[in-house]
Image: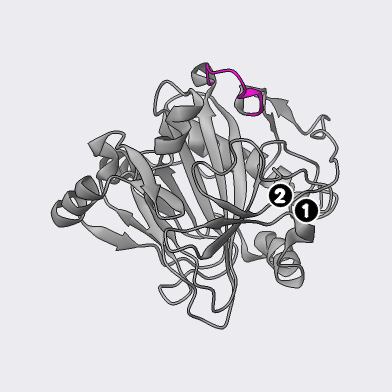
Amino acid sequence: MRELSQDEIAKYCEDGYVRLPGFFAVEEIEPLQRACHADPSLGGALMAFADSAGNAQEVALYTELSNDLVGVLPRLQRVVTTADALLGGRCYHWHSKLSMKLPCSAGTWDWHQDYGYWYHQGVLRPDMLTVAIAVDENTAENGCMSVIKGSHKLGRIEHGRKGEASGVDQARLEQALKQLERVEWHLEIGDAIYFHCNLLHASGPNRSATPRTIIHCSYNVVDNSPFLPGQEAHAYRPLAVMPDSAILDGAWDTVFDNQVFIDGDGNSGYGYKVLRAGSRADSQPPRMDVSTELY
């Protein structure tokens, strides 16, 4: 199992993110890549949110973790223990999402902080993070993520309407861009980046002829469960951690056929206009056997 160095932890604290090249072997990611390329709608699960210009930005969100590859990946030991180390305590799965940018698509994600939305779901402290894992190569041409380095130290910034979407306060964004460094995240397949929930980030359109897919797995510390009603899907639940070899060992059913995804109702839009909802069939609960640990 890969353990973070003290330098990597320090970099996360200083910059708001830490890059882990080759965190996944290409062979671990290839089944997900093939399935996404073969069925870009994820069997109808893909939702479309409007960006500030009204263009579609497509994602599939889920909180329940099935026996499918997309449910196993957020429970792998290296993924969870790295989140623990960076958060300074045990964590649980908040949600995951597949973010899809189809070839020659105009949709963008406007500048925002994840905690800008999660705060309004009743999470008291910004003791949360996300790991972004490249399913396809991520480049400037196909709409890779950009971040403002060190912006997590600005604290939570107010978010509001931006056209059909939601984004960070424009005046504070402009000052952050003047005073801090903007960095593009160019990623190879299997690269991972852990980033703080207050790190300002965005992504541009896909101007290329190839898709750009990335999976985001988000985590919260166990004593920071949302206190507001209606957030049962995001409440703390023990995490059945699986060994790092689970994907290559074939300890999963399908890639995403049995996974339950959020259908676009309720709070899933986070202030964004939902252009197209999705729906999926029921999934099975996480596999509980001698290879898993309740966390």
Residue 138 inside the magenta-drawn segment: no
Q: Is residue 85 visible?
A: no
- The residue at which mark 2 appears reads as 70
Q: Nearer the viewer, residue 261 or 74?
A: 261
Residue at the image point whose x is 32% and y is 43% from the top = 16
Task: Describe residue 125's horizontal placement relative to residue 282 as left or right.
Answer: left
At mark 2, the secondary structure is: helix
Residue 229 inside the magenta-drawn segment: yes
Q: Nearer the viewer, residue 252 or 231?
A: 231
Query: Of the residues under marks 2 and 1, which one precedes in the sequence?
Result: 2
Task: Describe residue 201's horizontal placement relative to residue 164 as left or right.
Answer: left
Residue at the image point whose x is 39% and y is 37% from the top = 116
Residue found at the far front of this picture:
163
The circle on residue 196 is none
Q: Nearer the viewer, residue 191 or 7?
A: 191
- The residue type indicated by label 2 comes to Val
The stretch of residues the image draws in magenta is 226-233
The circle on residue 256 is 1
Against 217, residue 101 (above or below) is: below
- Percent x, y for residue 29? 66, 61
Q: Nearer the viewer, residue 58 or 235?
A: 58
Residue at the image point whose x is 20% and y is 53% from the top = 174
- Image quadrant occupied by the N terminus: top right
**Main secondary structure found in the magenta portion:** loop
